[in-house]
Amino acid sequence: MSSWASSRKLWPAAVLTAILLAVGCQPPPPETSADQPPDEHPVAGSWQVEFTLDSVRSGTGPWTPVDTVSVVGQLMLAGPDTGQAVMLTGSSDFDFTPMLGRQISCYEPGPAEVRVGRIDERFNLHFTPGAFDCGFGATVGWSGDTLTGRWGEASFAGPVAIGRVLLIRR
């Protein structure tokens, strides 16, 4: 038998051996346990939040632009990163009275549950998750370690407001 013919027969065995060695030399995958807690949610933490008002609307009337007015508050959230939609707990302290002459509908400062939905690197924050005909939320995305985006108030029958939001990690 020629040397070419014998090496041709050994070639599949050599490839198989190389594959087995490569797979066998890999470190084992990290062990996961049902008891191991999930990572902290990326939005969890302490934030300074600035809401800037852009427009208001009463009922079904047209949007009316307003002079730029901002309010600054605090938001603290904690909770695991368990999926695309989670409920984080903490506290919020936002006072919209200097901006709107009233508090946001269905919002009360203090202990908070915030529903956080994720779409890629953007987050939907629902600050009043139990309210169906009022309340407010924001859609934000990362800019470094800061979240920026838009916020809006929902109201079935009352006035509504929209604007920009900036969350700075503290």
Image (cartoon, rainbow, N blue to C red):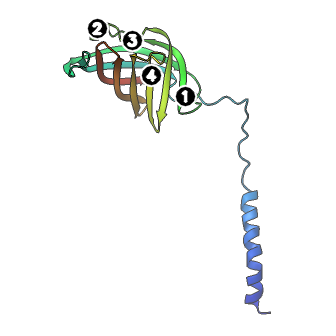
> Alpha carbon of mark 3 to alpha carbon of mark 1: how far?
22 Å
The kind of residue tagged 4 is: His
**Is the C-beta separation of discs 4 and 2 under 8 Å?**
no
Q: Earlier in the sequence, mark 3 or mark 4?
A: 3
> Alpha carbon of mark 4 to alpha carbon of mark 2: how far?
22 Å
**Is the C-beta separation of discs 3 and 4 under 8 Å?**
no
- Name the residue tied to disc 1: 41
Q: Earlier in the sequence, mark 1 or mark 4?
A: 1
- Name the residue tied to disc 2: 98
Q: Residue furthest bottom?
A: 1
Q: What percent of the width, then of the height, locates residue 13?
A: 77, 74
The kind of residue tagged 2 is: Pro
Left or right: where 132 falls relative to 1: left
> Alpha carbon of mark 3 to alpha carbon of mark 2: how far?
11 Å
Q: Determine the secondary structure under disc 2.
A: helix
Q: Earlier in the sequence, mark 4 or mark 2?
A: 2
- Name the residue tied to disc 3: 94
**Is the C-beta separation of discs 2 and 1 under 8 Å?**
no
> Which dot, 4 or 2, sits closer to the camera?
4
> Alpha carbon of mark 3 to alpha carbon of mark 4: how far?
14 Å
The kind of residue tagged 3 is: Phe
Q: What percent of the width, then of the height, locates residue 69?
A: 25, 16
Residue visible at 73% across and 32% down in the picture: 34
Q: What percent of the width, then of the height, locates residue 47?
A: 44, 20
Quarter of image, res 98 = top left
Left or right: where 36 falls relative to 75: right
